[in-house]
Amino acid sequence: MTAVNTRPSRARHADPGTLRLAGVHLPRWAAAFCAASGAGLALAARAAFGWSGWTTTTVAAVVLFITLLTAWSFRVEGRRRAKDRLASTVIYACMLAAVTPLLLILGYIAAKGAPALSWTLLTHSMNGVTASMPGGGVYAAIVGTLQQVGVASLIALPLGVLTAVYLVEYARGGPFARAVTFFVDVMTGVPSIVAGLFVYSFLLLGTGLRPFGAAGSLALALLMLPVVIRAGEEMLRLVPDQLREASYALGVPKWRTVLKVVLPTALSGLITSCLLAIARVTGETAPLILLVGYSSRINNDPFSGDQASLPMFIWDQLGKRTGNSGTFSEPRAWAAALVLVLLVLVINVVAHVLAALAKPKST
Amino acid sequence: MRAPTTPTGPRIPVTGHDLPPVTTGDATPPAAVPAAGGQRADRLFARIAAGAGGLVLAVMAAIGAFLIWKALPAFSGNSGNLILTQQWLPQASPPLFGIAAIAFGTLVTSLIASLIAVPVSIGVAMFIAHYAPRRLAVVLGGITDLLAAVPSLVFGMWGLYFLIPNTRGFQAWLSEYLGWIPLFRNTLPGVTTAQFGQSLLMAGIVLAIMIIPTISAITREVFRQVPDELMDAARALGATRWEVMRTAVLPFGRPGVISAAMLGLGRALGETIAVALVLNSGFAINWHLTEPGGDTLASTIALKFGEATSSAKGIPALVFAGLCLFAITLLVNSAARLIVARRKEFR
């Protein structure tokens, strides 16, 4: 713990005769003044040294602002308050530094993707459209993404919820349960490309099978599984034990209690966590490169043949960005990226809204 | 049945989205008195549930086993050293490949990403948990959560089309003024600003932007769980806001922060598509981080897959790279989990 500073502050009092409870503070406009002068100095430096980009100028302005404010505060308010101000400024700067690029990304995607977005794009496939031709669209890719993610959900969601049920309702803290918990945690860190490579090495490599949509689903399911289990576990633990006890008291066996009491009570939370898991894998590209390939035609069968998907559509069009073909393939890639981001964001927003609606009122 | 409000260690959420807090901890639900008729069904259901849990163990074991098995051919017929060779030419005759350069790329980019992302994320988490007004905090928390869900492909595209062209001057500046540190020097003869670009440094920065939402979401939750008593005690002693952070919040949250940082590191290590887009392929260990070129384990698997199927050693070599990546991420993630688990014992 920090000792209370008992020695007289370095701060110079305006009028030494009056008793003051608090030390001297910088005026309210101090931060604004320092920001303005920092920016001004940085602009002057930009003109003087001929900096070309805006990055250097911005960084210089921020550094100047922090230095000015801290130095002034140190002079007037003393060491501890100067440190406090420095820390606050740095923390605010961190927030800005984190949020700015993230908002830039969303803005850039919207700006690049929106002009290329059209009804034709959403309703046509790339069949017969070469990279250097206009037209074509993401229809086949949307179909593929929905099917692949759908199959992955059919595999991962029941398995994940069942595992969560095991961990919450049946596990008694034995070595097996602890191993499951540990490896579920570790599994969240398995890189998507490794999941893809694993499915490739046991399903496609040496078996003569060609890439197909559901193979990608298997890898996606591997990535979803730990997310569903962990979130499902948290949801099931929220179910009050009184409900279980009441059910047992009525002579209901445990498995029926789980199915008829515990799971329905946690249902909305479970749906939320499942949606978030789905959103997480919708944009996965790496496993699809190995397992699904890419097709410019509409393939409605996830169990045979190359299938398109939104991420692979973007990857394919980006691969053709150099030279003349870039004129049309680049905007197509951006439009598809916008569609993908919108899809993921919509799933997320729906999940968060559901979570807010289902939040238990008493805590 | 809520546990009494004793100060407990931080609970580490894995997914990062804001779920309602759970305080029941490890309390086991009451056991059912088995009803006579339901006994068999009960046992069956318990088995099915345990089987689903067992599947997780089986899958993890299978990943390791299959990757080792399918990588075996890569151990023979290689004219280079699997670990120390920098080139990646499994299709040449004789094949010549090793993971030295790509493992270097993986470690360097992830390290840069962590060095940038961890302090920034701590700042973000402190801001959201303890500096921002409540309503703003909710909004900002929601935004960062949404951004954690933006696909990595999109981050890669943005890095390639927006960030790299706009930061050529920054890289040139680094090389010119901090060039006395070899890491920042671009040694290409007569290099101009326009020739700066797809370097390991930029890949690291893009990765940093990607993992900030992940790390800050977890750290934020941990900082929120700091007991009010601790912070009030610090305030009562006259601590400034920063002193409260330093003496109450940071020490309490340290294991959580370390674990979050390692999870972020794990994500950066395994990131494929963003790196594959941002980096300009090159299979050599190059300490001059502002020079274009470089590759990582994950990006190599994605980029070299197409040509790998046509040669005998191509796929085994990539599977070996995947195996190394799996081993590294497994180590990092296990370490993160053990740190958290050790903390739990102190409760």
Image (cartoon, helix red, strand yellow):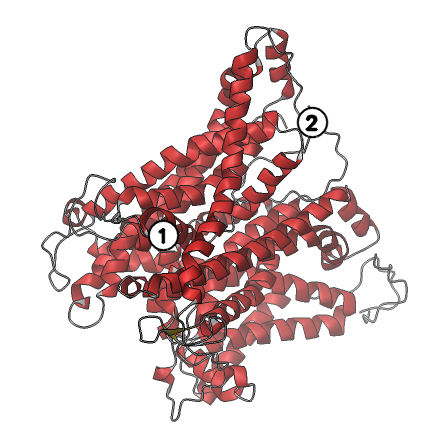
Q: In the image, are marks 2 and 1 on the same chain?
A: no
Q: Which residue is at a point 72% across and 68% down the rendered structure image?
A: A82
Residue B41 is left or right of residue A157, and the answer is: right
Residue that protrudes farthest toward the front in the picture: B76
Q: Are marks 2 and 1 in contact (CB under 8 Å)?
A: no
Which numbered circle lies on residue A287? 1
Residue B121 is left or right of residue A19, and the answer is: left
Task: Tell me the quarter of the picture where residue B290 sits.
Answer: bottom left
Q: Mark 2 or mark 1, which is nearer to you?
A: 1
Q: Which quarter shows the C terminus of chain A?
A: top right
Badge 1 amino acid: Pro
- Identify the residue under disc 2: B2
Residue A114 position in % (x across, y down): 25, 54
Q: Which residue is at a point 50% across and 45% down the rendered structure image?
A: B60
Which numbered circle lies on residue A182? none
Q: Chain of mark 2?
A: B
Task: Tell me the quarter of the picture where residue A164 sits.
Answer: top right
Q: Nearer the viewer, residue B159 or A155?
A: A155
Residue B257 position in % (x across, y down): 64, 54
Considering the numbered disc 1 on the image, is that residue within a helix, a strand or a loop? helix
Considering the numbered disc 2 on the image, is that residue within a helix, a strand or a loop? loop
How packed mark 2 is, by other alpha carbons closer than 10 Å (few <14, some 14-19, many 20 or more), is few
Total marks in image: 2
Q: Chain of mark 1?
A: A
Residue A230 position in % (x across, y down): 54, 38
Badge 2 amino acid: Arg
Q: Which residue is at a point 65% across and 61% down the rendered structure image?
A: A88
